[in-house]
Amino acid sequence: MYKSYFKRTIDGVGAVIGLLLLAPIFIAVTVGLYFANNGKPFFFQQRPGKKGQLFNIIKFKTMNDKKDDDGVLLPDKDRLTKIGVFVRKTSLDEIPQLLNVLKGEMSLIGPRPLLPEYLPLYNSVQQRRHDVKPGITGWAQVNGRNAISWEQKFELDVWYVKHLSFNLDARIFFLTFKKVLVREGINTVNTATTEPFKGN
């Protein structure tokens, strides 16, 4: 009952309340990133959702589009703006995903939506992470986030799918606040983004 009905209701109500409470921060970050990224405060990218169906995820844009002399984008760490560093460390870049939750493409809690090119790289067990909607935060995020290996992330994602319940979601919700406050596992060492998944 919770998985099929109440979870969606909680997602919708939670997303509305979250957007209302965070509106001042949302506006301030949007304005700051508008000037830092030449009028582009948001980042849109296709991600697979439930059953692998693609949707456009919305995040705050923490990196600019600067290129080298050959027209190739500079490394991620060189494109991360000063305000982008702050937004990422405080996890404010995730706020726009509340709009994805309202649209029914994401849940407040679930496995994080990854890149479409990873889909054919999953084994049969890892593919189960797509049996539920992806989330803004999840079991893997409160148990290491970018500081753990891909294999560990997928194990935690599949464990979540198997044990999904209101109590587990509530636990993840409150643990997320703790992780944000202490800024655990935001980035892997010396990188602006985590290393790409290359298969098993």
Image: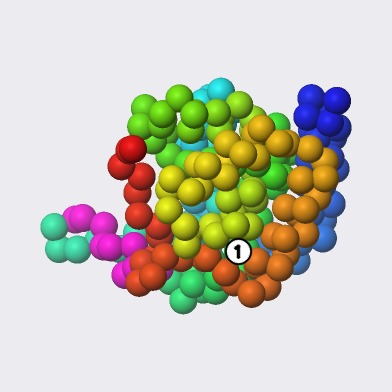
Q: Residues within 10 Å of mark 1 (few under 14, many from 20)?
A: some
Residue 97 in the image: x percent, y percent?
Answer: 64, 47
Residue ID for mark 1:
91
> Which of the two residues, 160 or 87, is positioned nearer the viewer here?
160
Residue at the (52%, 42%) spot, across then down? 155
Residue positioned 35% across, 49% down in the render: 196
22 relative to 84 in the view: left or right: right
Using the rendered image of the protein, determine whether residue 10 is visible from the camera's viewpoint: yes
Segment tinted magenta in the rendering: 71-80
| Above-or-below relation of 44 to 86 | above
- Secondary element at tag 1: loop
Amino acid at pointer 1: Ser
Q: Position of residue 12 (x, y in %)?
A: 81, 39
Question: Which quadrant of the rendered structure holds the N terminus?
Answer: top right
Q: Is residue 74 left or right of residue 145?
A: left
Q: In the rendered view, tell whether residue 187 sits above or below residue 47.
A: below
Q: Is residue 78 magenta?
A: yes
Q: What's the residue at 57%, 41% (across, down)?
A: 157
Residue 29 in sight from this viewpoint:
no
**Main secondary structure along the magenta-highlighted residues:** loop
Q: Position of residue 100 (x, y in %)?
A: 65, 40
Give the image quarter of residue 21.
bottom right
Is 46 on the left-hand or right-hand side of 58? left
Q: Is residue 16 magenta?
A: no
Picture quadrant of residue 76: bottom left
Q: Nearer the viewer, residue 143 or 20?
A: 143
Depicted 41 relative to depicted 166: above or below: below
Instruction: Say which quadrant the C terminus sits in.
Output: top left
Residue 57 pos. (x, y %) = 55, 42
